[in-house]
Amino acid sequence: MLVANLMAELEMDVWNRLDAVTDPELDEPITDMGFVERVEVTDAKMVRVEFRLPTYWCSPNFAFLMAFGIRQEVMSLPWVVEATVQLNDHCFNDQVNAGVNSGRSYHDIFAENCEGADLDEVVMKFLAKAFDRRQETVLLGLQGLGLAPADIVSMTLGTLRQIPFRGEEELRQLPRYLELLASQGLAQNSGDLAFPTWGGDPLKPGNLSDHLARLRSTRINMEFNGALCRGLAKTRYKEVEIGPDGPTLVDFIAGHVPPREETTANS
């Protein structure tokens, strides 16, 4: 029982790390999107993660980025000895699986299989979209609290951290926005402006409305793609909800994996 409990805890550690891996186009965790099929942890602290994408022909760029992200996050756990990532049911799964598990530079593997694309450029492109979406949520939250444009664009990072947001989406996106500001060096100290553009320029009160309109366009595009991905995945895999009485024969035939909450509760 002790060994089983330990293994369950280690598996949960892996799931928690996978929450940090996002679909690069949608800026949503792959765990929330239902992309992760299976996590296995052995007694030797070897981890295996299997994942899938909504369609057989999803962009290889996205597949590589998510596979590399999975391995990077899993290997960041101090107890992990080795991690194996397996992409299933995809036209590029052989290339992705061989590349991510080879130990070679992911920049070289990505360029070889994605028409010479530079991984850093691709990553920055999607980070810019993620930045727009996260910033818009926080800005709209401040408007909802009644703050004037001049107060918003002049707000410092220290002040932003003290704002008592109430909306669920603002509370979810605020730490993600702050993390991206810091990681990109856009705002790190309490006195730094909280709302620079992705290019690092300050916003002006008179331009806030136009700025928000542009951010809204980015968000709508990402939300549309997200809804499309969820719909395609649901249609492709034809999965059913596992009810309170546990998995049915259909679930076993289809190879469905119970949600983490149920797995943990039944451990």
Image: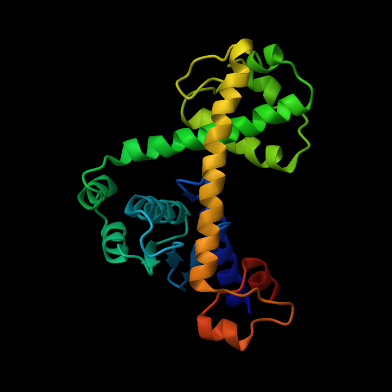
Q: Residue at x 68, y 18 (%)?
A: 152
* Left or right: 9 as drawn, with respect to 91: right
Please tell me whether residue 245 is drawn above or below residue 7 in the rendered image.
below
Asked whether 185 or 30 is in front, the reply is 30
Q: Residue furthest bottom?
A: 249
Residue 5, located in which quarter of the rendered image?
bottom right
Residue 179 seen by the camera: no
Please tell me whether residue 191 is drawn above or below residue 231 in the rendered image.
above
Which quarter of the rendered picture does the C terminus lie within?
bottom right
Which quarter of the rendered picture does the N terminus lie within?
bottom right
The location of residue 2, given as percent across then percent down, is 62, 75
Please tell me whether residue 49 is drawn above or below residue 155 in the rendered image.
below
* Left or right: 198 as drawn, with respect to 114: right
The location of residue 90, given as percent across then percent down, is 35, 65
- Count the marks: how many? 0
The location of residue 57, given as percent across then percent down, is 35, 61
Residue 91, located in which quarter of the rendered image?
bottom left
Asked whether 213 or 204 is in front, the reply is 213
Q: Residue at x 68, y 24 (%)?
A: 160
Asked whether 230 or 5 is in front, the reply is 230
The location of residue 115, given as percent across then percent down, is 22, 47
Residue 220 seen by the camera: yes
Color style of the picture? rainbow
Please tell me whether residue 42 is drawn above or below residue 12 in the rendered image.
below
